[in-house]
Image (cartoon, rainbow, N blue to C red):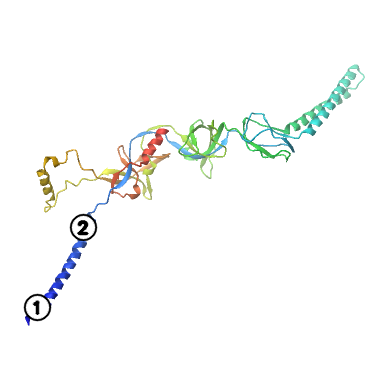
């Protein structure tokens, strides 16, 4: 009878033990997982850095300009006529006074021949009237009339000559002509553009700067110019500053003259302009990639050693340190680590708010917040937070490129 009831009780106890074991195992597993993630350290984020040092800096004012020829015009005809001759080719360099277009001037030439023949007769009439007046047989009024007629005929000849000269279009200065816009035999009305003429040896560039920088520029100040931001190979100087500030944009118009010996600059091009300011010493600058802007201000990340917690007191029940020391003391001499093989120091990123100043090229001036020797993160900030572990890897370092660019300058 007892055996009959004992078997179910034992089975029930066995089931209860299994359930308690499963619950205990799950609780132990959850606690172990929590402890693991609580004590797990995030891997160090790779960053590129730049060591802060006071240096000499040549600040620049950046601007976008439009290039034009120092002398450039669109040549047009003053009178109507039929195109008789086009004595130039596209992109030809011509001297001052060179013929560029000849309109049909046969009628003007004939009129001048007739007027000159009449002028000869007028001169003879004037001479005869003066002779008669000297002899006392001619009136003085006849001399006056003959003289006036002679002067009028000479003025008519000059007018006809001027009209005929307008039939010949000449280059007003030395330069390069463009593509002809007319054809032989074409009828041209006054004002029709024939061709463009540009002096490409010397160019000018017009650009604007903010009114806050007006006190930093002057006539004769050097500039650098290029078609791309990475190639500012053209040199020039400021030749004019607009005395009036545009009230709608608060910008000042500036004009500079640039030599163009190879003809690479062409009228109408956009160009990158850098106005060179006086050199300054002991200035703290950073690559612009190091500066992060936020609603709370501008800040950078500085790499600093993590606080050393190795000397913190160990819990009473923790004998791992003693065991480790004992193991090290009993280890053979050849297995011990050399004294200079210190463990790699842990580095963390510290957020530092700074005050930026002027910007020039790839650099930004920092007026407050950094000091000499600070190691500033220049790339990789998007993965950082204050106190995050970092690992310096300067394989790809924007600061190095910045230094190389400054060396070229």
Q: Quadrant of residue 126?
A: top right
Total marks shown come to 2
- Rendered image: mark on residue 266: none
Q: Find the residue positioned furthest to the left.
A: 2
Residue ranking furthest to the right:
137
292 on left or right of 237? left
Identity of the residue drawn at 23% across and 54% down:
40
How far across and down, in percent of the image, does residue 344 sit?
Answer: 23, 43
Locate the N terminus and report the quarter of the image it occupies.
bottom left
Q: Which residue in the structure is indicated by mark 2?
A: 35
Residue positioned 22% across, 59% down in the render? 33
Question: In front: mark 1 or mark 2?
Answer: 1
The foreground one among 183 and 363 is 183
The answer to whether any part of residue 188 appears in the image is no
Q: Residue 226 appears at what percent x and percent y?
A: 49, 37
**Residue hosting label 1:** 6
| Quadrant that contains the C terminus | top left
The mark that comes first in sequence, 1 or 2, is: 1
Question: In terms of depth relative to the viewer, which is nearer, 372 or 242?
Answer: 372
Secondary structure under the numbered disc 2 in the rendered image: helix
The local crowd at label 1, few if under 14, some if 14 to 19, many if 20 or more residues have their Cα within 10 Å, is few
Residue 92, quarter of the rendered image: top right
Q: Position of residue 301 (x, y in %)?
A: 32, 45
Along the horizontal axis of the image, is 155 left or right of 341? right
| Residue shown at 34% from the left, 47% from the top | 381
Q: Secondary structure at mark 1?
A: helix
**Residue 304: image x %, image y %?**
27, 43
């Amino acid at each position: 009878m007892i055996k009959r009831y004992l078997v179910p009780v034992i089975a029930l106890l066995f089931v209860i033990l299994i359930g308690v074991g499963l619950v205990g195992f799950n609780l132990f597993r959850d606690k172990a997982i929590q402890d693991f993630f609580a004590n797990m350290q995030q891997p160090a984020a790779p960053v590129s850095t730049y060591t802060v040092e006071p240096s000499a800096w040549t600040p620049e004012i950046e601007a976008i300009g439009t290039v034009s020829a120092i002398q450039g015009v669109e040549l047009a005809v003053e009178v109507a006529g039929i195109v008789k001759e086009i004595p130039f080719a596209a992109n030809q360099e011509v001297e001052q006074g060179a013929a560029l277009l000849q309109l049909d001037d046969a009628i003007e030439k004939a009129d001048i021949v007739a007027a000159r023949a009449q002028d000869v007769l007028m001169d003879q009439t004037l001479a005869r009237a003066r002779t008669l007046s000297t002899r006392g047989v001619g009136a003085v009024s006849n001399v006056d009339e003959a003289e006036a007629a002679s002067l009028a005929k000479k003025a008519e000849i000059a007018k006809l000559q001027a009209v005929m000269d307008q039939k010949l279009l000449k280059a007003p200065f030395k330069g390069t002509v463009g593509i002809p816009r007319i054809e032989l035999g074409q009828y041209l009305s006054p004002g029709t553009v024939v061709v463009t003429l540009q002096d490409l040896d010397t160019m000018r560039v017009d650009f604007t700067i903010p009114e806050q920088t007006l006190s930093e520029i002057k006539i004769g100040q050097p500039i650098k110019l290029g078609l791309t931001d990475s190639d500012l190979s053209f040199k020039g100087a400021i030749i004019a500053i607009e005395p009036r500030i545009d009230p709608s944009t608060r910008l000042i118009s500036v004009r500079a003259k640039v030599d163009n010996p190879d003809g690479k600059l062409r009228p109408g091009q956009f160009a990158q302009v850098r106005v060179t300011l006086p050199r300054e010493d002991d200035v703290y600058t950073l690559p612009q990639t190091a500066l992060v802007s936020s609603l709370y201000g501008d800040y950078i990340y500085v790499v600093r050693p993590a606080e050393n917690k190795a000397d913190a007191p160990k819990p009473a029940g923790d004998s791992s340190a003693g065991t480790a020391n004992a193991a090290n003391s009993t280890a053979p001499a050849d297995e011990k680590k050399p004294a200079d093989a210190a463990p790699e120091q842990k580095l963390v990123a510290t957020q530092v708010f700074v005050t930026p100043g002027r910007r020039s090229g790839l650099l930004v001036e920092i007026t407050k917040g950094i000091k000499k020797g600070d190691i500033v993160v220049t790339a990789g900030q998007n993965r950082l937070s204050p106190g995050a572990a970092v690992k310096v890897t300067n394989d790809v370092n924007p600061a190095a490129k910045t230094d190389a660019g400054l060396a070229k300058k």
